Amino acid sequence: MDMKKPVIIAASCLAASCACAAFDAPSLLQRSRTTLETNTVAGGGVAWAPYRGVVPAVGRFDGVWNWDGAFHAMALVRWDAELARDQFRIMMKFQGDDGMLPDVVYADVAKGVFRGCTKPPVWGWAVWTLDRAAPDDAFLREAYTSLKRYETFWRTKRFVESEGMFRYDGNSTDPEKRKLYCGWESGWDDSPRWDGEPGSMLPIDLNCWMVLYYRSLRDMAAKLGFASESAMWEERSRALARRIEEQLWDEKDECYYDREIAHGGDFSRVLTPASFMPLFIGIAPAHRAAAMARHAKRMEPGWPTVSYDNQKYRPDVYWRGRTWLNVAYFALKGLKFYGFDAIADTGRSTILGWVDAHKESIHENYNSLTGAPLGAAGFGWSAVFTIKFIDDWKKPREEEMPVK
């Protein structure tokens, strides 16, 4: 079935109806905080005791997930810095001998810890954020040591020497499980990005996350007095940023994409919010950012997890077309950083309008055509990015993350 024409028409009509979407910011902020507080699980019987863990959704996802925890921490620090730090203490408690941070630590001790994969390396940015908001030098020293070990894992287990870039992978000798875990490691699970072999791709988002990770380590090392280490992290961030610009920009489409491993490998040509990550971290030249702003028309108004014109787009299927607030935020804030305010502000108001329209709960994700809530109710990172869409929207890049 050809989905292109009806989807484009539907998206165009929806854009007109959502351009001036209204939302109640104070109510959304309170609901978001309540969601995160409700999702806090503590006590002697949970695996992460004595720490307090924040789960994605009580009764649905009862564990502390890796990148969920990083996102949760960045919001929690605004009112409970110790609870925010506990999210990383849980990861450190279960860090593997090879430096890998686990995918998930389940509340139920009997279920244990899932180590089939890790998650995108968001924790560098998260710890940097915690230190900026609520400095604690003892915690920073401990976290920095852990984050160095995690970098060693990425560099020894996920680095493609021939390309000088990173890839996702899974920890299994079974080919099918390894492919499945690789998708999970990306956090994008069943995305059309991975319909081939996810482990054979150089992902645009992962490599941008690693640039941000290196910058975070650079700033931590400098604060802790490790000048030579700070310089090393700076060089690694710059080298990786250069490779992204050299190898993950498609001149034909004038777009950032994932790319097959090997020089001259094919671009995926699957447009998703991940393609806008170079704008979020600020490595895109102005002319490339302008080209990405033109591609934004394919994502408007709901910023789904694959462009509306993609043949595999489905508005209500997990990472194949639903709107997820976290990745939509990175794309839209990246456009805003480069001055494309009208595009960014329209996307933000559309998404917050959808969240506000369903006052019974903040949901995991939303139908990208209708705005109907989907997935788990009371979802943690949707609450986090509701807060960021409101409180951090006008922050310049240097206040939100370590810059070059």
Image (tube, rainbow, N blue to C red):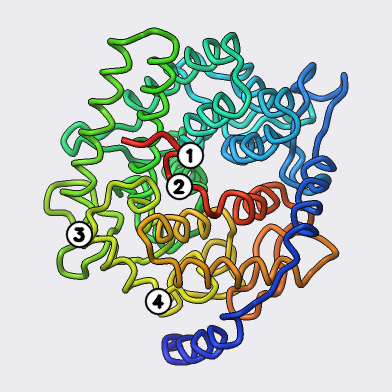
- Give the labeled residue for mark 3: 266
Residue 148, horizontal then vertical, whole percent = 42, 17
- Residue under the image location 53 percent in, 73 percent down: 346
Please tell me whether mark 4 or mark 2 is closer to you in this view.
Answer: 2
C-alpha gap between disc 4 and disc 2 = 26 Å
Q: In this view, does 160 lie above or below 186?
A: above
Dot label at residue 298: 4
Dot label at residue 399: 1
Please tell me whether mark 4 or mark 3 is closer to you in this view.
Answer: 4
Say which amino acid is labelled 1: Glu
Question: Could you classify mark 2 by the number of other residues whose Cα lies within 10 Å: few (under 14), some (14-19), or many (20 or more)?
Answer: few
Say which amino acid is labelled 3: Asp
Are the residues flagged by discs 1 and 2 in contact, CB closer than 8 Å? yes
Q: In this view, does 265 lie above or below 76?
A: below
Secondary structure of residue under mark 4 = helix
Residue 151, horizontal then vertical, whole percent = 39, 23
- Residue under the image location 72 percent in, 22 percent down: 82
